[in-house]
Image (spheres, rainbow, N blue to C red):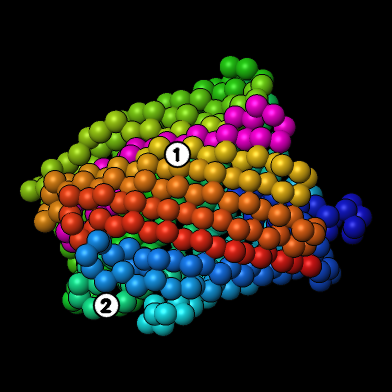
Amino acid sequence: MSKQHSLFTLSAVATGIIFASQANAIEPQPIDLGGVGLVPTLKISETYDDNIWEAADGDEKPSSWVTVVEPSLTLGARDRLNTYQLNYRLSNSTFHSSHDDDHTDHFLRADSHMEFSARSRLDLNAGYSKQQDTRDSTNRDNDEIGNKYHSTNIGGLYGFGAESAKMQLELGANQEWRTYDNNRDSGSFTREKDRDTLSLVTTGYYRVAPKTRLLAEVQYNDYDYDTNTLDSEGYRYLVGATWDATAKTTGTVKVGYEEKDFADASKNDPDNSTWEVGVTWSPLTYSRVKLNSSSRAEEGSSTENFVDTTSYGISWEHDLTDRITTNIGYTFTDKDYEGGSNEGRNDELDSYNLGVNYKMRRWLDLGVGYSFKDNSSTDADSAYDRNQVFFSATASL
């Protein structure tokens, strides 16, 4: 493989990972460091936010212009079918009317994909992040800034069976360690949220058509908290199908059953139906409709045992030209809080967004957009609405 072809391939790999969520993505040209490619990028956005704290009606609702600067560096290398990548991203947010909310988040991630034969492959990943959340009702009521935390994870996915074979098997594992850094002994009591999470997954596939496979999946999660009684084990049993570019549709549908067993016998153990749906329909080569839905029991906190969460989303991306793409989307999220002082609480969140992306140059994208959130809640302090208007520029070499 020539150096030129190697770097072109590396550029495609890096672009696909960093900008996978964008319909029109920049196409960076890597810097050749002698067998390793370096891809620097920079994203700058300016947002007007009319409710930066997601405060309820009747409460103080500060607004602010928010400047976010996100530089990133990606190192990548390729050896035949094996790829290796290291990415670091920094996200600095400046709230011009509320500097107490200024913060800088850090993200470090390493990925590798190795193919030992036509029937055997392994993906490995590891990551570290240090982040700060937006203030919520508890932070505001107790005069706290948003919760800060850092997390580390390491995981892998082993696949057995040729891509074109009748059957394939995947075995995955991930370990995450999360620790909160502030608000530990008052207000949010974040020390009660420190936890280690072990996740295991086994998925079997059976091909019924050239691009369609049936699947059966078992997921296991072990949640180990440091200081409270939310220790639990969760199981999910799913069946479904996945298909690749069948006619005008691609996607995965899984439905099944989940159960959660708390170590504390006094807590109710939920058992519910569960599902995951992600489908993309392309009626035209330049238009894409995406449907997403999920339902599962999410982790709780010191104020609830768990949160039964269901969401439905639809979005439409349309290429007006080779350079201009529009997008519009809507998501509805329903949350039922179970156990603790939040027992019986229900939140219903409507999220709307629209935007336009302009691929000005190979190395430069410009964007403009608007989003609106309306959260209704049986907890009056958690009901809010929020408008955001933003402009962004993403650049590379």
Earlier-in-chain disc, 1 versus 2: 2
Residue 128 percent coordinates (x, y) = 49, 67
Which residue is identified by label 1? 313
Rendered residue at 77%/58% (across/down): 360
From the viewer's perspective, tell me whether residue 246 is left or right of residue 223: right
Q: Which span of residues is magenta-colored?
A: 281-310
**CB under 8 Å between discs 1 and 2:** no
| Distance Cα–Cα, label 1 vs label 2 | 33 Å
Q: Quadrant of residue 280?
A: top right
Rendered residue at 23%/68% (across/down): 59
Is the C terminus in the top left, top right, bottom left or bottom right quadrant? bottom right
Q: Quick check: can you spot residue 355?
A: yes
Which residue is identified by label 2? 144
Residue 258 percent coordinates (x, y) = 29, 35
* Residue 342 drawn in magenta: no
* Residue 286 drawn in magenta: yes
Q: Residue furthest left?
A: 266
Disc 2 secondary structure class = loop
Magenta: main secondary structure: strand
Disc 2 residue type (three-letter): Glu
